Image (cartoon, rainbow, N blue to C red):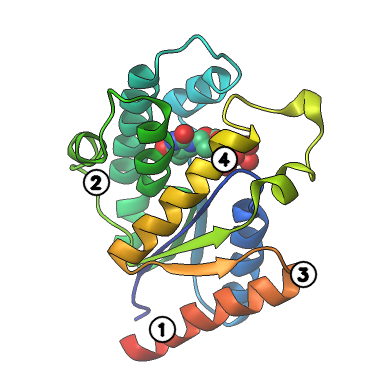
Amino acid sequence: MQKSLFIVLEGGDAAGTTTHSHLLKGFLEGKGFKVHLTQEPSQSKIGKLLREFLKNKDIPPTTDALLFAADRNLHYKIEIKNKLEEGFIVISDRYIESSIVYQSIQSHEISVEWVKEINKFVGLPDITIILDIDPKIALARKEDEDLEKFEDTSFLDKVRNLYLQRAKQEGYYIISSDAIIEFVQEKIQKIIIDKLKNMS
Ligand code: TYD
């Protein structure tokens, strides 16, 4: 029976988590694995509300933090956990580390410890990969009018630095996303294949 594996791709806005999650799913399915791809904010009603709030600068950061935690709690308990139990490889485009990084930077009221506390009811990933890119390069890929509230360079510089700091503390993988997509994807695939080999 296939062993389950919970993989999370993280990074600043436009770092490529969505593109690489899809490519990774295709790669692993091509190898014969059952793969479930998901993302946060999730598809639930809470996730949809969060997507609206991403366009609204008046929402208090503490409200965002609590809603992201509620969305994740539901997402894990009714979707991710079940898929893992069924033996799927689950790939999530963003997860708890997005809350730790984005919400703690949003407000001095919010500490990393508090974000961990409100997220303590969910299972943690087996592998977290941080896609690292200079926000100026990342945002140049987006149209100005489409930008959400976190998509400004000085905020994303802080996001980048905290992701790198957290990766060192927690032993997450860091991959530079400032290269051609195929090259970045190959590096991600290698990490996952090595992990799967070690499990068998
Ligand atoms: P993103 O992957 O950028 O969505 P899209 O590709 O549709 O733009 O994620 C949405 C934003 O939400 C992104 O700016 C990061 C932010 N976010 C948080 O602040 N906290 C969280 O816990 C999560 C999951 C996302």
Where's residue 3, x and y in %?
34, 77
Find numbered disc 3 in the image and state the secondary structure of the residue it sits on.
loop
Relative to 198, 46 lies left or right:
right
Frontmost of labels 3 and 4 is 4
Sort mark 4 into few (<14), some (14-19) or many (20+) by Cα contacts within 10 Å: many
Marks 1,2: beta carbons within 8 A: no
Marks 1,3: beta carbons within 8 A: no
Frontmost of labels 4 and 2 is 4
Q: Amino acid at mark 4?
A: Leu
Find numbered disc 1 in the image and state the secondary structure of the residue it sits on.
helix
Find numbered disc 2 in the image and state the secondary structure of the residue it sits on.
loop
Q: Which residue is mark 4?
A: 156
Q: Amino acid at mark 2?
A: Val
Residue 122: image tag:
2
Where's residue 148, x and y in %?
64, 26
The yes-or-no answer for disc 3 within 8 Å of ligand 1 is no
Let me know if residue 200 appears in the view. Answer: no
The residue at the point 40 percent across, 23 percent down is 64
Of the two numbered discs 4 and 1 on the same chain, state the one appearing first in sequence: 4
Q: Amino acid at mark 3?
A: Ile
Residue 180: image tag:
3
Front-lying residue, 28 or 139: 139
Residue 196: image tag:
1
Question: From mark 1 to mark 3, how far is it between C-alphas?
Answer: 25 Å
Sort mark 3 into few (<14), some (14-19) or many (20+) by Cα contacts within 10 Å: few
Question: From mark 3 to mark 2, how far is it between C-alphas?
Answer: 34 Å
Question: From mark 4 to mark 2, how far is it between C-alphas?
Answer: 26 Å
Front-lying residue, 46 or 50: 50
Of the two numbered discs 4 and 2 on the same chain, state the one appearing first in sequence: 2
